[in-house]
Amino acid sequence: MHIQFSQSRPQSARLVAQVTDKGKLPEGLEKALAEGAESARFKGKAGQLFEGFVERDGQVLRLALAGAGDRNDEARLANCEKAGAALAAKYQSIGDAELVLDLAGSSLSAEEAASVLLGLRLRNWRYDIYRTTMKDEQKVTLATVTVVGAPEGTEAAWDELTHLAAGVEFTRELITEPANILYPESFVERCRERFAGTGAEIIVLDEAEMEKLGMGSLLGVGLGSDRESRILAIRWDGGEAGAAPTAFVGKGVTFDTGGISIKPGPGMEDMKWDMGGAGAVAGAMLALAGRKAKANIVGVMGLVENMPDGKAQRPGDVVTSMSGQTIEVLNTDAEGRLVLADALHWTQEEFKPARVLDFATLTGAMIIALGHEFAGVFSNDDELARQLHEAGEATGDRNWRLPIGPAYDKLINSPIADMKNIGGRAAGSITAAQFLQRFIADGTPWAHVDVAGMVWSDKPGRTWGKGATGYGVRLLDRFVRDTIEG
Ligand code: BES
Ligand code: MN
Ligand code: ZN
């Protein structure tokens, strides 16, 4: 979506939107519209819409009022996003290519106006490249938003947010792509293309290099796949030279059949988004590099496809991780932790990070515990967990901490190896976190974010339609802004 700023309403546009505060219609509003809004019980609540037709300067316009809620609401920016998102949801496919956002006389600050635009752009995103027979009425027609009467500073505020939007969109694109298109090598290629010219450095490990490093845990997951595994690291050094980076590590299982412990058929297609953690890391890196964040960050993605095959690993196999610790693979469907074990260890060896945050669609049990409202956070560091929580509250990428500790850790001891890759039925998301913690060096602040319930949505949400949400990008961008740059 193209967003542009103009002094006056383009003559060609027929669709105009104004943003209104709760209980306060715009001054000078045409009588028919003002009375219509009242009889339709339009109050200007956040995300509420009302539309009618008015005649202005001899032209008939379709005029939409979008509510931004109470001016003093503490969720004001989120409410402004809702106003923008509601406009995109309603006018995305009505046939008009241009929407004029008329902010003259609105109470919005520049930051609030930029939030309306963010909601518009994010909610308008769709990925229709594989739909060749779509009817005209279904196609996205809204392509341009022209902002008139914007408060001073809106353009600069929006410029800053475009990088965040691009990051969220990139994550959604990666998550939406099917697994025959997006597999470890093509994931890497897509990132190479997208990061060209950003100044970020791309580092890739192929299977031969991973074998040399002893990554038997990660490589074991890919044994059944014809697609080669990869580790991808994207490095952005915008901070103090030589300062230890913050590492983001993502689970990038480009498809998870379960392997020999194969999953049931219904719903298995969802496992194309089992790379959602890696997708969030890639999108966050794009946002950070795009806005030239003053921080040293490395994003590491463990990219593997989990397939059943004559060469696939079996339940009961014992693998040796790069850390030297051995793992009894009791269930080949608990593969994410096997991928992360080596990705986490390598990240610490290679980059000596000041803190490590991992993102993974790790357990179905996470969805049972928290549904689709919060991601689960597991951490050895109170401060880090608090910072993540605050960044979540500020951006809408919400998360909630759960406990870890020795009583859970012992549930993954194995009689034949150093650990097994599943606990019992109890506390499945916690035992998965305990497994990961065994690959974190003592003293390294670490948080694991289980995003299984967050990366995909079966129904439209705040700033997304059905499908990929882009969860994690805004969380990480905000975390970096507030705790590293701040
Ligand atoms: N990718 C899945 C977890 C998942 C399930 C994410 C549904 C999103 C939606 C993961 O690899 C997995 O299969 N986990 C198993 C672990 C079990 C075998 C201990 C699970 O959750 O059932
Ligand atoms: Mn699995
Ligand atoms: Zn998985």
Image (cartoon, rainbow, N blue to C red):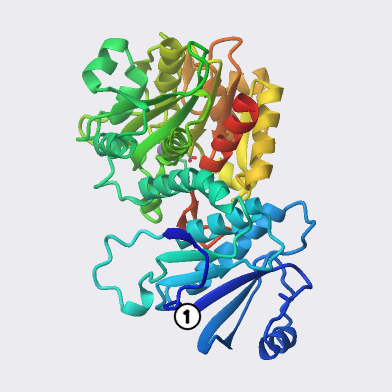
Residue 93: x, y in percent? 42, 74
Q: Position of residue 324 (x, y in %)?
A: 41, 8
Nearer to the camera, 171 or 236: 236
Left or right of residue 362: residue 274: left
Q: Identify the image quadrant of the N terminus.
A: bottom left
Judged from the image, the quadrant occupied by ligand 2 is: top left
Residue 129 x/y as whole percent: 28, 60
Q: Is 420 above or below relative to 396?
A: above
As displayed, is residue 464 above or below residue 99?
Answer: above
Q: Quadrant of residue 281?
A: top left
Is residue 329 shown above or below 79?
above
- Residue visible at 53% across and 46% down in the picture: 161
Dot 1 lies on which element? loop
Specify whether residue 326 is in view. no
- From this viewpoint, is residue 393 visible? yes
Q: Which of 372 and 160 lies nearest the eye of the viewer? A: 160
Q: Quadrant of the C terminus?
A: top right
Q: Determine whether 98 is above or below 422 in the image.
A: below
Residue pictured at 23% horizontal, 36% vertical: 309
Q: Quadrant of residue 289?
A: top left
Q: Nearer the viewer, residue 370 or 35?
A: 35
Task: Write the residue at 64% across / 53% down.
Answer: 110
Residue displayed at 70% across by 89% down: 31
Residue designated by label 1: 14
